[in-house]
Amino acid sequence: MALDRSSDQPRPEYPRPQFRRDRWLNLNGVWEFEIDRSDTGRERGLLERELAGEIVVPFAPESALSGVGEQDFMRAVWYRRTVTVPPDWRGDRVLLHFGAVDHDATVWVDGTEVGRHRGGFSGFCVDITDAAPAGTPVPVVVRARDEPEAPQARGKQSAAYAPHGPLYGRTTGIWQTVWMEPVPRVAVRRPRITPNFAAGAFDVQVPLSANLPGGTVRLTVRDAAGEVAGGSVRADLDLAPRLSLVLPPERIRPWSPADPHLYDLDIELRDADGRVVDRVESYAGLRGVAVTGKQIRLNGEVVFQRLVLDQGYYPDGLMTAPSDADLVRDIRLGLAAGFNGARLHQKVFEERYLYHADRLGYLVWGEFGDWGCNTGQGQSTNQRPDASYVQEWLEVLDRDHSHPAIVGWCPMNETWQEYGDRITALDDVMRAMFLATKAHDTSRPVLDTSGYAHRITESDVFDSHDYEQDPDTFAANHAALGAGEPYVNRADGTNESWSVGYRGQPFFVSEFGGIWWNPAEADRPQSEATSWGYGNRVRDVEEFHTRFEGLVHVLLGHPDMFGYCYTQLTDVFQEQNGVYAFDRSEKFETRRIRAAQLRPAAIEAAARPER
């Protein structure tokens, strides 16, 4: 497949909007590339020689936009590009960033290994200063290994050759932006910004690469009218200086879906003489998330969470959005259909999506792509996630902590395993991921796993997945929630629960609907269809709206339901149950979908004081 060299640089925008420096260099574009099917490339000299083909980074080789379009398994792939560090970066440390590389990456610069990373969803960076002198062209080589049989966090990537059911094409190698930046010898690392809504303040922790004798960290909060609050803290007493920035009451403007106000936050590291050593730009939203009985409150108000499942796939880019505008469009499509947020499903979305969710007021539940830890077949399947799950999830938490749009965390999804008499590897890792999340972030509720096998008794939230298509039966499934008996997922053909007991936590149906409609197959018997969805396929658009309105009516009218998540935003390859088509065109009457969701929810009405 010939590469298009006439187009502009792909994905040219700054990849890290909440932690921004002025100087950086985007390395997306054409790289040398070679598939290494047997993972013998190191022995065959791929580290030293030019590679046989080319690829457009940051698109995975399976995607059309990469210019490769290889659909078969690739145990390893190699990338090579000559890079020149700008001469005016001399004297600084140079960091080479990878937004995401699937799955095990090794990076060499001028033949010297400079770093390794495991995990296809979290980013990493390597210091290339010593291997890449400023002004000197040097080769950067990346090898990515992606073992098809190994249990690993894959999300929705098929472990069989062809996509099938809810599994789609694979993503191998680099699939997010590659870039580099200079930083001073003592530099600011990613700040952790936690809104303290009750105090009208931002609690900010600023990790440093090292302490700076006599230095200070200066923080300034600004809005459109100018400085709102500021303060300084010494940079030589704590490895991660902390400061609470209290906003004047008259300048407080809470972040919410109705008014997604963001404050600018400037962070400066100054030396003993007051000179600026490092400066980064950030932003923050002041909002609080609280749990009261079965309610989840935002800024003290009950906001019913009308969420949609978003899997973040694109026909030509797979897991990589073709452009930044595509990320914005997906959020606007959700809003247009009456959803106020999304559950980001089986994929860690790139940070620019979260930036747009922050500025558009779109509620988000952050999730990990934990599928892929199965061993065995069918009912004998055993889920055995390993320590890499915890490591990668901690990297995700560190990257995404400060985004106000994120209102909850869900480390795992549809974990299924008998709740037997022995503690399993799944139990260990699920508890480790839950505790890691709570240790890292005490400001948001945590759901141990979405649907199926709940194993953490102290989980802040409880849920189930219910794809019943008949609204009356659907309502009956959830009728006993108020009595402390929620609908739970059970092993097929049994009445055995996979989960620990329900303790009265806030509850939502985090997957439902999935109504199947493919107009191109309307005249083909359902048993012969090449697409799929849940339950019996609707006969026409009108039947879709009737079923959608009935299901949504049940959950909006339930006094003990804090929200829901409808499956799904768009069709994805053979799974054709989206409210939009895979190309994002309209399938139904979007205004009717919106109208069905905008009636007041029972839990919201119950929380309002009587007048």
Image: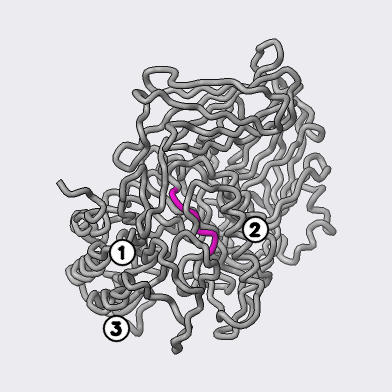
- Judged left or right of residue 71, residue 366 is left
Nearer the camera: disc 2 or disc 1: 1
The amino acid type found where label 1 is placed reads Asp
The part of the image, by quadrant, that contains residue 178 is top right
| Residue farthest top in this picture | 273
Determine which residue is flagged by label 1: 560
Dot 1 or dot 3: first in sequence order is 3
Determine which residue is flagged by label 3: 525
Neighbour tally class for label 3: few under 14, some 14-19, many 20 plus, Cα within 10 Å: few
Q: Nearer the viewer, residue 560 or 372?
A: 560
Q: Are marks 1 and 3 in contact (CB under 8 Å)?
A: no
Determine which residue is flagged by label 2: 390
Mark 1 secondary-structure assignment: loop
Which SS type dominates the magenta stretch?
Answer: strand
- Judged left or right of residue 102, residue 44 is right
Quarter containing the N terminus: bottom right
Q: Nearer the viewer, residue 245 or 12?
A: 245
The part of the image, by quadrant, that contains residue 287 is top left
Dot 2 or dot 1: first in sequence order is 2
Mark 2 secondary-structure assignment: helix
Dot 2 or dot 3: first in sequence order is 2
Q: Which residues are magenta?
A: 407-412
Q: Nearer the viewer, residue 341 or 352?
A: 341
The residue lying at 56 percent from left, 79 percent from top is 419
Q: Is residue 328 above or below residue 512?
A: above
- Judged left or right of residue 587, residue 102 is right
Nearer the camera: disc 2 or disc 3: 2
Q: Can residue 241 be seen here?
A: yes
Neighbour tally class for label 2: few under 14, some 14-19, many 20 plus, Cα within 10 Å: many
Q: Is residue 396 above or below residue 421?
A: above
The amino acid type found where label 3 is placed reads Pro
Real-space Cα separation, disc 1 to disc 3, in angstroms? 39 Å
